[in-house]
Image (cartoon, helix red, strand yellow):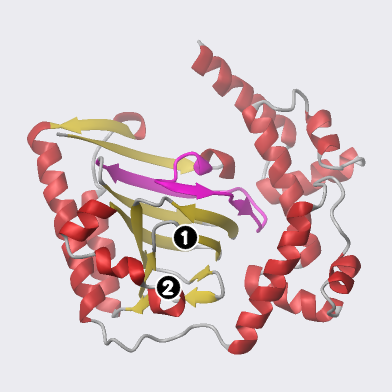
Amino acid sequence: MRCRYEEQLFHDIDQFRAHMWRLDIEPLQLSRGRLELGFATLAFEDLAITRLDCNRKVSDRLHMDPSWLLLVVQLAPQRWGAQVAPAESLTVIAPDTEYRTGVPDGFRCAEAAIRLDLADELGLGRLSQLKGAEAIIPISAAAARSAEHRANQLLGVSASNGLAVIGGETAQALRDGCLDFLCFLRGVAFSTTRGRASFASTEGKHRFTLVEDALQIIETAPVEQPPSVAILATTLNTTRRTLLNAFQETLGTSPSRYMLARRLNGVQRDLHCGKSPTVTDAALDYGFEHFGRFAYHYRTLFGEMPSATLKRASMIRRDVLG
């Protein structure tokens, strides 16, 4: 038996994207400043325990693998579609589901990803039927603290360079600990009063739907020519003020700042993967023609100049290629 342990601190949202276990994600950094996203995971073939903490506001769209179930111990609030999971809750992400999600500055959570055959074996498979507000299970503060403590104990593995492949009796002991953690979460989930609270008002759901419709327009428009807020409001038959309020409540930012962040995240992604050979090429690809203003916005959002991103990415690719 073998398992893989990894611990990293990411300063680049696109590098983090590649490390999310069994999730197809499209994260965007929205709040300003250098990203510090802590990630630790202990992974077997059929389960993984993960700890996440993030100092910046991030918006994401994710799709869960059809053969996996995800349980999220919310140690800070998190938006899942039209619902908001508060701190001290357990969110169930069912297989083959898609969400728009958002986390605030200072976010923390512990996660357990379980392959469905193991989930059924452990009596967790029934949770995959929960949807919407039913999938957000309030738990006690003591249960949340205990879940965090148990996850931290499992993820306290010592590894050089933050990476280790573990086998033998140590791997078996860690697996036993992971199974105990899953049984603890099962007990927490099924001991909760069956009447589950909804965390989205009718008005909140309407605002989320409005933002969802606006994001579909934004995502289908040429990335270098995003629609204006006025055009968005007219197309959606609403006012600019209503649209602004909906974005602030749902994403914590304005439509114009969201579209700017989306373009800047695209530049960062292209610089990181080598799609654009120069900063100028990347900026032009995303519709930035005033390079001084572009560099200012990039540094404000990510805490470094685009040239620094390109230099670091080039060094990483050279090291990988030898």
Q: Residues within 10 Å of mark 2 (few under 14, many from 20)?
A: some
Queried whether the magenta region covers residue 174, the answer comes back as no
Q: Secondary structure under badge 1?
A: loop
Spot the residue most to the top: 322
> Amino acid under label 1?
Thr
Q: Secondary structure under badge 2?
A: loop
Query: Is residue 148 visible to the viewer in this orientation of the structure?
Result: yes
**Label drawn at residue 97:** 1
Give the quarter of the image for residue 266: top right
Give the quarter of the image for residue 125: bottom left
- Viewer-side residue, 106 vs 222: 222
Q: CA distance from mark 2 to mark 1?
A: 9 Å
The residue where tag 2 is placed is 131
* Horizontal side, residue 279 vs residue 25: left or right: right
Give the quarter of the image for residue 307: top right
* Residue 284 screen position, x and y as percent: 86, 36
- Viewer-side residue, 160 vs 134: 134
Residue occupying image coordinates x 51% and y 68%: 80
- Viewer-side residue, 52 vs 3: 3
- Tell me if residue 214 comes above or below residue 24 in the rendering: below
Residues at discs 2 and 1 in contact (Cβ within 8 Å): yes
- Tell me if residue 16 comes above or below residue 2 in the rendering: below
Queried whether the magenta region covers residue 32, the answer comes back as yes
Magenta residues (range)? 16-44
Query: Is residue 253 visible to the viewer in this orientation of the structure?
Result: no
> Amino acid under label 2?
Lys
- Tell me if residue 29 comes above or below residue 132 in the rendering: above
Q: Residues within 10 Å of mark 1 (few under 14, many from 20)?
A: few
* Residue 76 screen position, x and y as percent: 44, 69
Q: Quadrant of the N terminus?
A: top left
